[in-house]
Image (cartoon, rainbow, N blue to C red):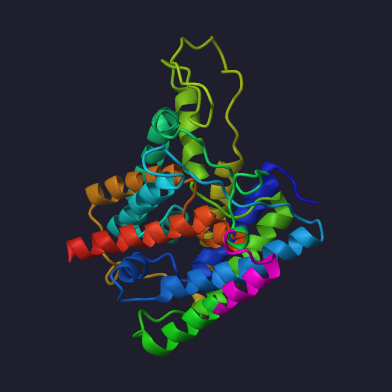
Amino acid sequence: MPSNSNLATAAAGVVFGAALTASAVYSPNTIVGQMQLQDFHMLKVFLAASASSALIIPLLNSVNLAETSPRCPSTINLFGPYDANILGGAVLGAGMTLTGACPGTVLAQVATGITSGFFVLAGAVLGGILWSRFGSRIKNSPSTASGSNSSSSPTVPSVLKLSLPQTLVAFETLCATLLLGLELVAKPGRPAPISAPVGGLLIGIAQGTSLLFTGNTLGVSTVYEEAGHWFWHVLPSTKHTPSSSKTASTPTTPPPGPFPGAPSTHALSFAAGILAGSFAFTHLAPASLLATPSAAVELEIGRLTAVMGGCLMVFGARLAGGCTSGHGISGMATMGVASFVSVTAVFAGGMGVAAMLG
């Protein structure tokens, strides 16, 4: 049965970190190359991971080993129920293009020693700190994580008036068609030790492991929000109500000694597991399965750009209610409309910035 212990959460992170590293999707060159439409390895892994997750999640739901539901729309009440999904997704995509990372892959970059990853991670933590402080003032309706039950989460089957099996067949067919088309038409990118479909399947297995160990689908951007909650929690001068609270945050004088109501450490445990899994895979796997880029060929990301892009990346992900793993691998697999909207915005924002930068 799933557990909410930090050990189980960290174990799920280990599997996900190893899968990210094995799939070779964490390289800055690969991520930026995707946004420039020059290297489609990232998209192919993404499609395979989403397709395999879309089979694993309902299977585990059907045998009562997991209970998941789609993510709710994320809104700031500007121009519709999905406005924060669109804006946040676009900002996340822009941050990915600037950094060559996403909230999950930056941890693999750090574990494998990619220099820019350390600066992106610093910016990501800064983004989590800012979101923890100001997020509740921006976002009017906090999104619901995958494990919650909500009747306000429109799904593709409900919109298209299809059954879940019919929708899954259509989704799997679409993913397979796109994968085949990319294999036939897209020019080869950087060599990878394993094929993109196999890498995506490994991430799908990590999805199942996460559900079995913790009851939660994959998602990483909450790591940085949780880090932000801890920052404000231990800061001597203020006592902060995290942005996920329904009440406005009000700095107060903290009581002496440890603060009551310490934030959760589950997401941070998951991040620690990702780091450990990626590091272990890098150092223990056969050389033929490793694709750790050398510093001589890896894309150079300026330090300031890395920090700023990392901050944008996480702030956008929290605004959208999820990142490329939370909305992309997990959210699309649960057929949530909000996740499809967010992922479209991520790629649109990332490709738009890549085009502007030339």
- Residue lying at the far front in this picture: please name it: 161
Q: Percent from the top left, x then y, of residue 319?
A: 42, 42
Q: Quadrant of the C terminus?
A: bottom left
Q: Quadrant of residue 351?
A: bottom left
Q: Percent from the top left, x then y, of residue 140?
A: 46, 33
**Range shown magenta:** 159-173
Question: Would residue 315 be visible to someone looking at this image?
Answer: yes
Q: Nearer the viewer, residue 78 or 41?
A: 78
Number of marks drawn = 0
Report if residue 239 lies within the magenta region.
Answer: no
Residue in view at x 74 percent, y 65 percent = 59
Q: Percent from the top left, x then y, of residue 100?
A: 33, 60
Q: Percent from the top left, x then y, of residue 202?
A: 60, 71
Quick check: 79 left or right of 163?
Answer: left
Compared with 257, 109 (above or below) is: below
Compared with 288, 127 (above or below) is: above
Quick check: 243 left or right of 148?
Answer: left
